[in-house]
């Protein structure tokens, strides 16, 4: 049986590990970190595959999509709601990625602006009124099992070091769940074989600064889902958790938003995931 003392000791160990590694990596003026280097610091970064059903091979899995990969066609945009939903009256073209890029002179933007616009495009789809959603809901953001907030709250991160810039925004806030979903905007080129500075330091910051103890232990502390946006119209999804011994970062292959329907659908499905709890998950982030 876990006592409060052992729980507090385990939380302290996680915080100490995260703080130590955060301090080490913060001193490195690099836009990316190699997985072998991270392994030496107690971070296991593992690439996972995307199966035919559009499910990422997270193991253990803390976030499971509730919608199929045909989400965008199953729940089409409601035509008569578009002008009312967005000030300025965007039409169907605003939800077409190529038009979206042309409208904003996308090719003239830097990587930092790319990432922000990609995030904005996904959120437009998340909030758009759609037909056919269960329980007479209007938009996908209403199907999320945890409350969404676009207020950065306690663990917004804004970091500039050398030529590297990254920013993290938390989405859900829920006092009864240890799960969280965050967006990361990376001002760097996406690399498929290593993780960005923001992806790694952002998770470490959550672990070192934002734990609060509830009442019982968790074998897998603070499951976190990262929606990671890069320049060159690319992104990926990362599931992070700390098992008490190591930080585990499971990352998807890079996806290209030029493949609009498949990529946007993937991001929307994971942003509206069912939350899968470990048997004793009770650590929360405030």
Image (cartoon, rainbow, N blue to C red):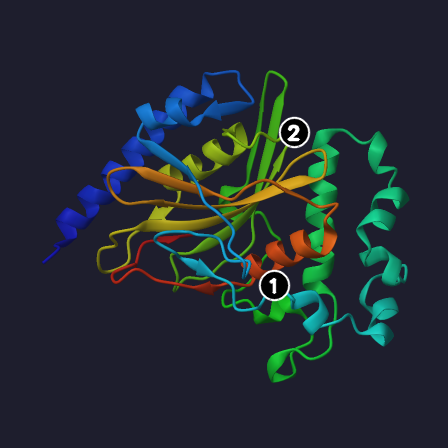
Out of 135 and 264, give the one closest to the viewer.
264
Q: Residue furthest front?
A: 52
| Residue at left offset 34%, top offset 38% | 247
- Check whether the beta carbons of the residues at disc 1 and disc 2 lie within 8 A of each other: no
Instruction: Provide the residue designation for mark 1.
Output: 69
Out of 271 and 4, give the one closest to the viewer.
271
Instruction: Describe residue 110's horizontal placement relative to residue 161 as left or right.
Output: right
The circle drawn on residue 114 is none
Figure check: 153 above or below 177: above
Q: How many marks?
A: 2
For marks 1 and 2, give the CA distance: 29 Å
| Residue at left offset 52%, top offset 51% | 50
Q: Residues within 10 Å of mark 1 (few under 14, many from 20)?
A: many
Figure check: 20 above or below 83: above
Circle 1 SS class: loop
Q: Is residue 258 visible?
A: yes
Circle 2 SS class: loop
In percent of width and height, residue 96 lies at 82, 55
Instruction: Describe residue 149's horizontal placement relative to residue 97 as left or right.
Output: left
Instruction: Provide the residue designation for mark 2.
Output: 187
**In the rendered image, which quarter contains the N terminus?**
bottom left
In percent of width and height, residue 8 lies at 20, 46
Figure check: 35 above or below 178: above
In percent of width and height, residue 185 lies at 63, 38
């Amino acid at each position: 049986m876990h006592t409060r003392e052992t729980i507090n000791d385990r939380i302290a160990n996680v915080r100490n590990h995260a703080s130590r590694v955060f301090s080490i990596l913060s001193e490195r003026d690099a836009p990316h970190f190699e997985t072998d280097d991270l392994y030496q610091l107690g971070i296991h970064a593992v690439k996972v595959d995307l199966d035919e059903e559009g499910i990422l091979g997270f193991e253990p899995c803390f976030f499971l999509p509730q919608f199929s990969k045909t989400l965008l066609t199953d729940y089409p945009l409601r035509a008569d709601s578009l002008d009312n939903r967005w000030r300025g009256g965007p039409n169907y073209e605003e939800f077409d990625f190529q038009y979206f890029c042309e409208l904003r002179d996308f090719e003239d933007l830097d990587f930092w602006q790319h990432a922000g616009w990609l995030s904005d495009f996904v959120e437009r789809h998340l909030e758009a009124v759609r037909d056919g959603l269960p329980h007479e809901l209007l938009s996908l953001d209403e199907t999320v099992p945890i409350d969404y907030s676009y207020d950065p709250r306690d663990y917004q991160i804004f970091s500039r070091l050398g030529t590297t810039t990254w920013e993290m925004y938390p989405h859900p806030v829920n006092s009864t769940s240890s799960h969280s979903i965050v967006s990361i905007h990376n001002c760097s080129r996406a690399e498929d074989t290593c993780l960005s500075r923001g992806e790694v330091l952002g998770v470490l910051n959550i672990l070192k600064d934002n734990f609060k103890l509830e009442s019982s232990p968790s074998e897998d502390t603070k499951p976190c889902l990262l929606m990671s946006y890069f320049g060159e119209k690319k992104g990926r999804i990362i599931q992070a958790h700390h098992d008490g011994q190591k930080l585990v970062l499971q990352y998807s292959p890079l996806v290209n938003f030029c493949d609009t329907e498949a990529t946007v659908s993937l991001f929307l499905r994971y942003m509206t995931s069912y939350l899968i709890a470990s048997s004793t998950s009770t650590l929360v982030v405030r």
